[in-house]
Amino acid sequence: MSRPALTRPLRSEKFGLERTDPLRWRLKTDKVGRLNWAYIRDDDELKRHPQTPYEKHVLGLETGLSEFPKAETPYDAALNGLRFFKELQLDKGLWACRYGGPMFLLIGVIAAHYLTKTPVPEEWKIEIIRYLTNSAHPIDGGWGLHSEDKSTVFGTACNYVVIRLLGMPPDHPVAVKARTTLHKFGGAVGCPHWGKVFLSILNLYEWDGVNPVPPDLWVLPDWVPVHPGKWWVHCRQVYLPMGYLYSEKVKAPLDPLLESLRSELYTTPYDSIDFSKHRNNVSEIDIYYPHTKILNFVNSAMVICEKFFRPDWLKKKAKDVVVDLIRKENQNSDFLCVGPINNVLNAIVVFCEEGPDSKNFLRHKERFADFMYISEEGMLMMGTNGVQCWDTSFALQTICTIGAGDLPEFRETVKKGLEFLDNSQFTENCVPGSYRDNRLGCWPFSTKDQGYTVSDCTAEALKAVLMVQKLPHVETLISDERIYPAIDVLLSLQNRGSFSPGSFASYEKIRGPPLLELLNPAEVFGNIMVEYPYVECSDSVVIGLSYFRDHSSYRRDEVVRAINDAVAYIKSEQDVNGGWYGSWGICFTYAAMFAIEALSYQGEVYANSEVVRKGCHFLAKRQEADGGWGESYRSCETLTYVPHEQSQVVNTAWACLALMLAEYPDVEVIKRGIRLIMSRQQPNGEWKQEGIEGVFNRSCMIEYPNYKFYFPIKALGMFAKKYSNASL
């Protein structure tokens, strides 16, 4: 189960590790939500820009915000929570958060710095070492795939390399403990594929021991079923630069530090290891998605072809195609890329192709900071450049849902939030030939600069815009004419083939056959090769289109058909127990909230829908003795509901919202959950961080720290409006 929660004093303090002055950190942003943490050494600048409540909050400092008398009613508790949460809004209208959790990201940005001889800022070195020390497993000192995971070879090998490259000596107790655990697992030869790639880039592993990543696939005609253009966007964009690096056998020059690391990472001398025999050696503790027989056959065949049958002209052509696509990805995303892994790999490719002084490489270096986030525990690397648009959309929806948008104290909050969504809408499509769908009129998950729209992000932003612009005191910033292109894109994203018709995937329609998953090479992630239908994405699109259906007659018949077909898909995905599997949040409670909300907008509630009744019974049966709900991330891995060790505020809010939207007749069940949420509220209106909230690819958890604010606030406010605001 989950590793123990963060305890104080932090382990970094016990070891006497250096810490930067937390009073000198400032979060700089712009109108499209860029987040850059800067360490300010100039005292005059510090005085000109005092720390905001948000900066103090994430750094573990006293915020100085007001405390309130203990709330007696749900609505008082909701308003107290909202009063705290509005103080975390940044001046450009967005809400920021540390989108941490994955523990395999830092190796990429540090490898990119090391290979390109780019100095790592001193404050980064100090705080990354602190973060890795504080996030190491308290028993064995290793690291896992994510921050709540057991220790694995992947996490331990990669982060051991990071602390050593950043200056921690090999005899430091943190390094010794991690190295002992790594050796217990058999050493770094048991790293999964991505780990082997990063170690090879750093000359700490041999490319002969890496299963093939052939860039030649990009030369195939587009109609070929295995063409990478048909893969899921994260998969194809990671393996795009990875293919270049594999083909060119890019590696850092060997130096004394790397020589030392070669002797530390393995249980036998480096020169005695036949790395080619370790291509398929993946530690049992790491493996989540084992190789298929067909993948092993294809890998072996590609090794032979590469050695004996690959002509130079094909290698050069593949390289040219890959470099061109990398440049298009950089142009479409202003060098942020779809995520941090391909961001750093693209940067290395640009460095190899254009040199250290090229404009493009320099822009890549600037963008590294967009993924780095400071916290009380230290500096981490985020899963994207943030969650800005997603969080802001839900925050605005919450304010409107509970009726707080009309209250004078929240009007400026709403106004600034709408302005941010206004600035975040895409105003152009991608570069032709980059294997990207239309995005004009849509919204991103993080920022407009990042360049990627997601079906549910556009739908939730659309809902937020329509809700906010109905408030009498709010000026209409986003006209219907600007919304119509978003509707066009949403309609175009609905899957209409034989595989899950009516559903919505994440970034794009399903392009490739699910059989491609037989070639999944990542070993630690599931469902990465192609787009898949997702209940939550389909739910959100139904919700957004339902709001639009009631607002406008634009493409009315097509909108209604899209809603009806998506609803049919949602119903078909309910399991025999009445639950829905959540692919982006933990897990069944998360998906139930979205599914029941989508159905409720079609008039389907407990009284008239067997599907909704089954969903409600699924949730009610899993209520804990204290009135709350608590679901473990293990649900995501096992595809079955696994209870958490204790009730979680976020899971409880999701369950209560689902039951309220369903008009579940046993109000006492909901009331007990509301009491649990109120009992965990702090005097200043906040809720403390509990278990991790999100997930991707079934096996890797990721943080959504703002979920503990707007979902409980929404649940409290909805209960007060729907039932009673009497004292509980």
Image (spheres, rainbow, N blue to C red):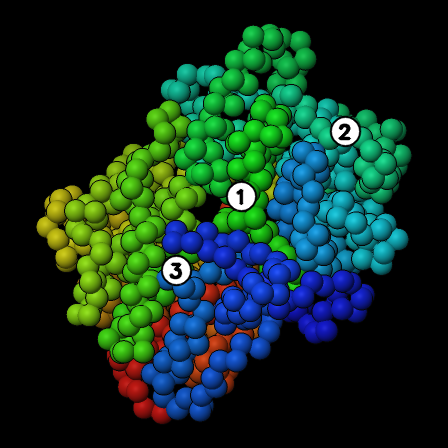
Q: Amino acid at mark 3?
A: Lys
Mark 2 or 3, nearer chain start: 3
Q: Is residue 531 left or right of residue 633?
A: left
Residue pointed to by mark 3: 92
Identify the residue at horizontal 84%, vertical 30% (top origin).
273
Q: Is residue 17 left or right of residue 448?
A: right
Question: Which mark's residue is nearer the viewer, 2 or 1?
Answer: 1
Per the image, label 2 sits on a secondary structure element best described as loop
Residue 403 in the image: above or below residue 296: below
Label 3 crowd (10 A; few <14 / some 14-19 / many >=20): some
Q: Nearer the viewer, residue 251 or 694?
A: 251
Q: Amino acid at mark 2?
A: Pro
Q: Is residue 149 left or right of residue 659?
A: right
Residue 2 shows in the view: no
Disc number for residue 367? 1
Q: Nearer the viewer, residue 649 or 573?
A: 649
Disc number for residue 689? none
State how far apart marks 2 and 3 are (Cα).
44 Å
Coordinates of residue 260 in the picture (x, y in percent):
86, 39
Coordinates of residue 632 in the picture (x, y in percent):
55, 63
Per the image, label 1 sits on a secondary structure element best described as helix
Coordinates of residue 680 in the picture (x, y in percent):
50, 81
Identify the residue at horizontal 77%, vertical 34% (top origin).
204
Per the image, label 3 sits on a secondary structure element best described as loop
